[in-house]
Image (cartoon, rainbow, N blue to C red):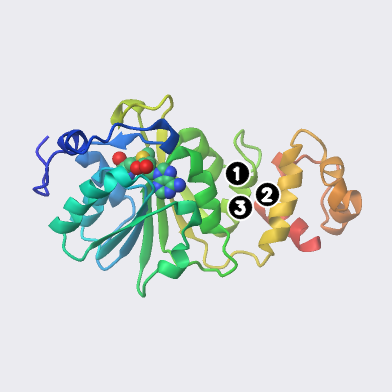
């Protein structure tokens, strides 16, 4: 497919730079620039916005973000093989693409964030995606440094992010995201859209910060959700025993016979505040 940005088609880029996909790095590339533009557009207007991207790979999503007018992209990529391909994009968009070679899990995005609006857009490597999301939604300071997160996950993870009580996918991730963000699944992406195709369907999730979540200690909420969902089939008086069991539940005015999956986000926050 001819590229609208005048850069070579991604298949050529991959071939020329020998970027055979490595499973250990979660490399499933998006080569259709219409699709990468659809992902980038989910983040809303990018005019004047600095975008953090994790794992640009050969740069399909990076190119879409730049073509849609982002002021600057700061991309963190672990695979040094991708750097020459990304340098070509940087040359095409002078001063607008900065590539940091490194591990996104060890990157302090907040410190790197410049003045002005910041959005995060990424087709995440599946092995570190959930941990990155948790890092972005659980900083001590809130509202956070970012305006929105537009992230590709395995569909099953997307369902856990947007889940609410009594749903099959409700768990720790649903509580943490439900507390601090407004999260929605934007659209699914079938395996065939990737090179190589993964085994499962993917989905793009869009999250914006909840400006005023009920005040609560992050550590306390993490401890409560970890204990409660660690034994999700048990009654809370049992699963929360190490944290105070029945006494804690009575303090929070929650029936000790209930199970974790029936508690709303507000009830989890109340429990955390009673810890
Ligand atoms: N953005 C490209 C696309 O959409 O085609 C590639 C997405 S691919 C699913 C994930 C990318 O993340 C790969 O380029 C991989 O090398 C990179 N990656 C894997 N683990 C990483 C980590 N810990 N930190 C930064 N990048 C990582």
Assess disc 2: are there few (<14), some (14-19) or many (≥20) residues with their C-alpha within 10 Å of its C-alpha: some
**Helix, strand or loop for disc 3:** helix
The mark nearer the N terminus, 3 or 2, is 3
Tell me if the residue at label 3 has its CB under 8 Å from ligand 1: no
Q: Residue at x 16, y 59 (%)?
A: 93
Query: Mark 1 and 3 residues: CB-CB less than 8 Å, in contact?
Result: no
Residue 210 in picture, x, y percent from top left: 52, 62
**Helix, strand or loop for disc 1:** loop
Nearer to us of marks 3 and 2 is: 3
- Which residue carries the number 1 mark? 164
- Which residue carries the number 2 mark? 264
Q: Residue at x 61, y 52 (%)?
A: 176
Query: How many angstroms separate mark 1 from mark 3 (CA)?
Result: 11 Å
Ligand 1 falls in which quarter?
Answer: top left
The mark nearer the N terminus, 2 or 1, is 1
Residue 151, can we see it?
no
- Residue 176, label in figure: 3
Quarter occupied by residue 44:
bottom left
Residue 170 in picture, x, y percent from top left: 62, 40
Tell me if the residue at label 2 has its CB under 8 Å from ligand 1: no
Rendered-image quadrant of the N terminus: top left
Query: Mark 2 and 1 residues: CB-CB less than 8 Å, in contact?
Result: yes
Q: Nearer the viewer, residue 121 or 266?
A: 121
């Amino acid at each position: 497919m001819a590229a609208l940005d005048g850069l070579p088609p991604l298949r050529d880029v991959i071939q020329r730079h020998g970027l055979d996909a490595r499973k250990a790095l979660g490399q499933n590339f998006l080569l259709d620039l219409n699709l990468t533009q659809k992902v980038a557009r989910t983040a809303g207007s990018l005019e004047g916005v600095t975008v953090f991207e994790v794992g640009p790979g050969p740069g399909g999503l990076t190119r879409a973000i730049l073509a849609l007018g982002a002021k600057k992209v700061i991309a963190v990529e672990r695979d040094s093989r991708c750097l020459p391909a990304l340098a070509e994009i940087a040359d095409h968009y002078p001063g607008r693409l900065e590539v940091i070679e490194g591990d996104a899990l060890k990157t302090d995005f907040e410190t790197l964030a410049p003045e002005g609006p910041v959005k995060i857009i990424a087709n995440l490597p599946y092995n570190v995606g959930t941990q990155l999301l948790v890092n972005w939604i659980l900083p001590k300071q809130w509202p956070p440094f970012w305006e929105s997160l537009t992230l590709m996950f395995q569909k099953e993870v997307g369902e856990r992010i947007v889940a609410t009580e009594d749903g099959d996918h409700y768990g720790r991730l649903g509580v943490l995201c439900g507390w601090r963000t407004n999260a929605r699944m934007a659209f699914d992406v079938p395996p065939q859209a990737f090179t190589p195709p993964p085994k499962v369907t993917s989905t793009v999730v869009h999250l914006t910060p909840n400006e005023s979540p009920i005040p609560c200690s992050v550590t306390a909420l993490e401890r409560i959700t970890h204990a409660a969902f660690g034994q999700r089939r048990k009654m809370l008086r049992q699963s929360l025993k190490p944290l105070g069991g029945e006494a804690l539940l009575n303090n929070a005015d929650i029936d000790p016979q209930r199970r974790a999956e029936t508690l709303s986000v507000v009830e989890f926050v109340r429990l955390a505040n009673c810890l």
